[in-house]
Each structure stands twice: as structure tokens, then as C-alpha cells.
Image: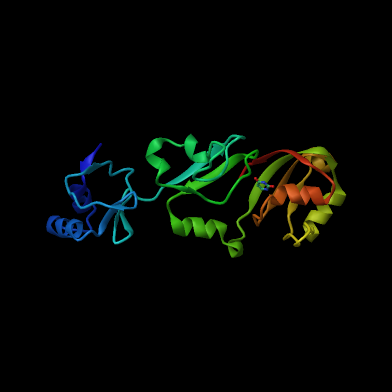
Amino acid sequence: MLQRLDKILSNSGRLTRSQARDALKAGRVAVYGETVRDGAAKFDPETAPVTLDGAPVAGGTVVLLLNKPAGYVTATRDSRFPTVMDLLPSVYRRRVVPVGRLDKDTRGLLILTDDGDFAHRMLAPKSHVWKLYEAELDGPVGPEERERFREGISIGDRICLPAELYLPEGKPSSLVRVRIREGKFHQVKRMFGAVGREVTALKRLR
Ligand code: URA
């Protein structure tokens, strides 16, 4: 339900009514990143990102888990293709940004958030957040490739951190899962490319 901005501020428990009035007048309050001075302006306190001196005072933080279909680029805007933002309810569109990136043809789990600290923790190389993918390949891979992934495979300009390749029942297969803890450009596709396989479909599961 929409509420006056001065009410949202005083309801937050951070400011009294007169402090809220002063903060608004001083231009210290922003909604959707833009300064709002009018205390009578109405917003939804559940979703509108209200900040005081840049720090959130209402709306909490948002973390969205999107099951991304193929055909959408992971970007906030693109001149040629639809973006993942087009898939979101409009209240979130100006609020969240994607955490990392999936290729246009990759499906599956994409996180979007307005929580900068959380995004940083998920993406920082030293956090080593594991990502699990299901890959369809143009031919089978087996125990030999699993060993090469474990050792850290070279993808041209760099050597990947050890990754785990899961073979159904331990047998060679062209439908496999792979778990990596870094996220370089086209990483999974390049890893399979390094063992002579092409990824024909890719989905992030976790
Ligand atoms: N690795 C890739 O090659 N593509 C993705 O979209 C994600 C990981």
C-alpha cells in the first residue's frame, strides 16, 4: 500500500517526524536513487528503496532468484536483445542488478539484488562461491576429462581452479554436471572446449 514518504521515514524508527522533515528538506533522502524532497510523495514501503544519506531506511534489501530462459542477455539494457530485466515485475526493474552473468543462450539460476555487499561476497574471487551447471555436449566425456578438470584445466590464457565433473553413474556421458568456483567469461564452454567438446546447452542449477 502506498504511503507518504515522511511517514515511511518516521515509521522506520530511525527518525522522528521533525527529523524526517528536516532530512527531506536538506535533500538527504532518495528513492530509486533520486533525491525526493516532498514528504507527501507516496511510495510502497515494502518495495521502494528509500535511502537516507545513501543508506537504506525502508524496503529492506531484495534478492531475486530468476530461472533465466535462453534468449535474454544478462544486462540492464541492450540495443539488440531482450534483457533479464524485461522478465522482472516492474517494481524491481529499477532496483536490482544481476549478480554476475549468464550467456544469452544459458538458462537457469541468476541472482539479482540491490544489496551491494551481498553481490560483492558472491562475486569476489576469494569467496570461491561454488556454481553447479548441467551441460549438454556434442559428445561424451569420461573419467579422463574428470581428472583433467580436477587438476585445473588450461583454457588458453589461464589455468582454471580445480573443478568437479560429475558423470552419471561414473560413466562417460554427453549430459554431465560440472561444479566450478570461479566465473570467468564463457568459463564452462571454454573448459569443455579445452577437452575437445562443444557445449550445446548449458543450465545453471545452483
Ligand atoms: N560458463 C559459460 O560458459 N557460460 C555461462 O553462461 C556460464 C558459465
Q: Is residue 57 rendered to the left or right of residue 188?
A: left
Q: Which quadrant, please, contains the C terminus?
A: top right
Q: Is residue 140 left or right of residue 124?
A: right
- State the residue lying farthest toward the left: 18
Q: Residue furthest right?
A: 144
Outermost residue toward the bottom in this view: 126
**Residue drawn at point x = 46 percent, y = 59 percent:** 117
For this rendering, which residue is in front, 112 or 179?
112
Which of the pair 169/143 is nearer the observer? 143
Task: Specify whether 77 is left or right of 164.
Answer: left
**Residue 15 x %, y %:** 19, 58
How is colour applied across the structure in the image? rainbow
So how many labels did they put on this image?
0
Q: In the image, what residue occupies the spot 63% across and 50% down?
A: 131
Position of the N terminus by quadrant = top left
Q: Which residue is at the front of the view, 171 or 188?
A: 188
- Residue 64 position, x and y percent, is 47, 43
Q: Is residue 74 left or right of residue 140?
A: left
Horizontal and vertical percent for residue 164? 74, 52
Q: Quadrant of residue 17?
A: bottom left
Question: Residue lying furthest front in this view?
Answer: 79
Residue at x 19% of width, y 61% of height: 26
**127 lies above or below 31:** below
Residue closest to the eye, 97 or 115: 97
Where is residue 2 drawn, in percent x and y? 24, 38
